[in-house]
Image (spheres, grey):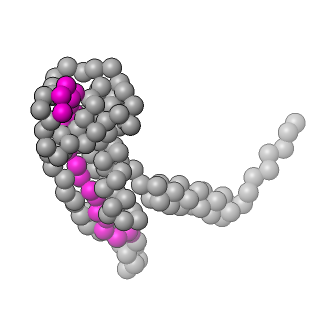
Amino acid sequence: MMKIISLPKKKQSIRVLNMITAIFILGSLFGCATGSTIITGTKRSAISPNEVKIYLDPPAEYESIGIIEVSSDVIFSRQTAQDKAMEALKSRAAKVGANGVLLTNTGSQSVGTAGYYSNGIFYGGGSSDKILAQGRAIYVIQE
């Protein structure tokens, strides 16, 4: 018969808390960009995000494929978050076969402090910022 050796309850609790903390910190360090895509035209075969170009002004001739919205957490700097948002736009556009994104809106959003009180002590994080970007996934026929 095999004997199972277990850690004392206190050590198990500390180990679990440390693992949860490590996962939270790693997630915060790398941040993420999230978003959505709404298909409004004809979807094409996926391409590489490196082939997608961001347009501020509409090209001469293009077909609209859909609407893309993304957000990126501001972790290290606003510029890094903006870069991640642009890469997320390109990535989402590439998945629907768009070779361009016509940028329609950018902005930021601040999220207030969240947490809880216990025995007169507040536990929680500070406020966080997000960079928001919206564009039209397009297939450029002529620039």
Up the image or down, 54 lies above or below 48; here it is: below
Residue 16 falls in image quadrant: bottom right
Q: Is 113 on the left or on the right of 57, as rendered?
A: right
Q: Position of residue 129 (x, y in %)?
A: 29, 63
From the viewer's side, name the closer residue of 6 and 139: 139
Residue 42 highlighted magenta (yes or no): no
Q: Residue furthest right?
A: 1
Is any part of residue 40 visible from this angle?
no
**Which quadrant of the rendered structure holds the N terminus?**
top right
Q: Is residue 10 left or right of residue 129?
A: right
Q: Quick one: quadrant of the C terminus?
A: top left
Residue at 37% x, 75% y is 122
Q: Is residue 54 found left or right of 76 in the rendered image? A: left
Quadrant in the picture for residue 11: bottom right
Residue at the image point whose x is 22% and y is 27% from the top:
139
In percent of width and height, residue 107 lies at 19, 57
Q: Is residue 133 magenta?
A: yes
Q: How many marks?
A: 0
Q: Is residue 30 visible?
A: yes
Q: Mainly helix, strand or loop, the magenta region?
A: strand
Residue pictured at 33% horizontal, 61% vertical: 79
Q: Please state the horizontal and vertical placement of residue 19, each as a whole percent of the image.
A: 59, 56
Whole-percent x and y of residue 48?
Answer: 39, 31
In this view of the protein, which residue sits in the foreground, 2 or 85? 85
Magenta segment: 124-143
Q: Is residue 36 above or below residue 139?
A: below
Which of the pair 98/16 is nearer the observer?
Answer: 98
Give the residue displayed 34% in from the left and 57% down from the top.
Answer: 81
